[in-house]
Structures are given as C-alpha cells and as structure tokens.
Image: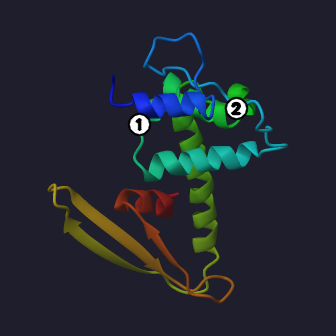
C-alpha cells in the first residue's frame, strides 16, 4: 500500500474526484467537477496583465506557458482561456515589450510635463551572490503639483527614457 493510498481512497470514495479504471493506487487523472459553473465573463486584458505581472515579478521563464501542466491548470480554472493562452514564450516576450513601451511613454510624458528640475539619486550595492545592483530615483514636482518619486530598476532604462 502506498503512502497516499488513504488520501486517494478518501478523495475517490467521498468526493468522487478520480476517474475509475486507472491503475490502482495511482490517481493520475482528476475529473473536473462539472457542477462548478464557468465564470460569466472575464477580461482578456486583465488576464494578460496578471500573467505578465506574475511572470516578471516571480522571475518565471517565458517558456513555462508552453508546458502542458501549466496550460491544464489554467484551463481547469476557466476553459474559455483555451483560445487565448499563449503557445510560445515569444508571445510572452512581445506582451512584456508592449507593456514596457506603454509605461515608457507614460513616464516620458510625465517627466516632460514636470514643473521643476529633476534630481536623481542612485544607490549601488552588491547582492549576496555578488551581482552588482543599482537603483535610480527621479525626484521632481509633477504637472499636478505633487512630488512623485519614480524608481527604475536599471540605469540603462533611465538613460533610454531620457534620451528618447
């Protein structure tokens, strides 16, 4: 008897989650609960934003969207995603680049409209794994009279924005 036999039996007998006819003791296929209704509507734009945010903030490889396990997980949650799920890491890359360009233009406009001079501060350090890090902060008074602080992850991005 395997260490998961009790849990497998419970899920099968009480909750009827596993399909019958599979190899004994190895619950490999979980049946979808047909009683849970699909969401009435969902927002593709919000899905893309949340997926990009998760991939970027958690340092997920772009190619993860190509794996069947990931796709199955999302399709289990909402089958309407089937025609909208990216099939390639290149799609994720292009979505991220589009998002970056939109933010870049927004920041550029904000900086052009500022009512004051811009003052920059930089913080450099070396991480525990000996990676050089730099943070740059732009201090200025916006066109609305407020003093926003915009942080950039890299000096290169800051220079790209300022030179364009």
Cβ atoms at labels 2 and 1 below 8 Å apart: no
The disc label shown at residue 33, or none: 2
Q: Is residue 89 visible?
A: no
The Cα–Cα distance between marks 2 and 1, rounded to whole angstroms, is 30 Å
N-term-proximal mark, 2 vs 1: 2
Labels in figure, total: 2
Tell me residue 164's x, y (percent): 53, 57
Left or right of residue 74, residue 90 in this image: left
Tell me residue 5's x, y (percent): 41, 27
Which element carries disc 2, helix, strand or loop? Answer: loop
Tell me residue 136's x, y (percent): 37, 71
Left or right of residue 118, residue 121 in this image: left
* Residue at numbered disc 1: 61
Residue 141 position (above or below residue 66): below
Residue that appears at 45% across and 70% down: 151
Residue that appears at 72% across and 46% down: 45
Quadrant where the N terminus sits is top left
Tell me residue 143's x, y (percent): 67, 82
Q: Residue furthest bottom?
A: 145
| Residue 14 position by quadrant | top right
Residue that appears at 37% across and 57% down: 156
Q: Residue furthest right?
A: 40
Q: Camera-side residue: 21 or 124?
A: 21
């Amino acid at each position: 008897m395997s260490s998961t036999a009790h849990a497998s039996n419970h899920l099968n007998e009480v909750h009827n989650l596993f399909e019958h006819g599979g190899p004994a003791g190895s619950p490999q296929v979980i049946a979808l609960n047909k009683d849970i209704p699909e969401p009435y509507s969902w927002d593709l734009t919000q899905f893309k934003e949340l997926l990009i945010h998760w991939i970027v903030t958690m340092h997920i490889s772009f190619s993860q969207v190509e794996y069947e396990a990931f796709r199955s997980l999302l399709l289990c949650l909402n089958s309407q995603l089937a025609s909208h799920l990216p099939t390639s890491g290149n799609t994720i890359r292009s979505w991220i680049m589009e998002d970056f360009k939109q933010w870049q233009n927004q920041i550029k406009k904000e900086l052009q409209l500022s009512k004051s001079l811009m003052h920059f501060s930089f913080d450099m350090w070396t991480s525990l794994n000996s990676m050089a890090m730099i943070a740059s902060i732009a201090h200025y008074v916006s066109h609305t009279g407020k003093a926003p602080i915009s942080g950039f992850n890299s000096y290169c991005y800051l220079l790209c924005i300022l030179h364009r």
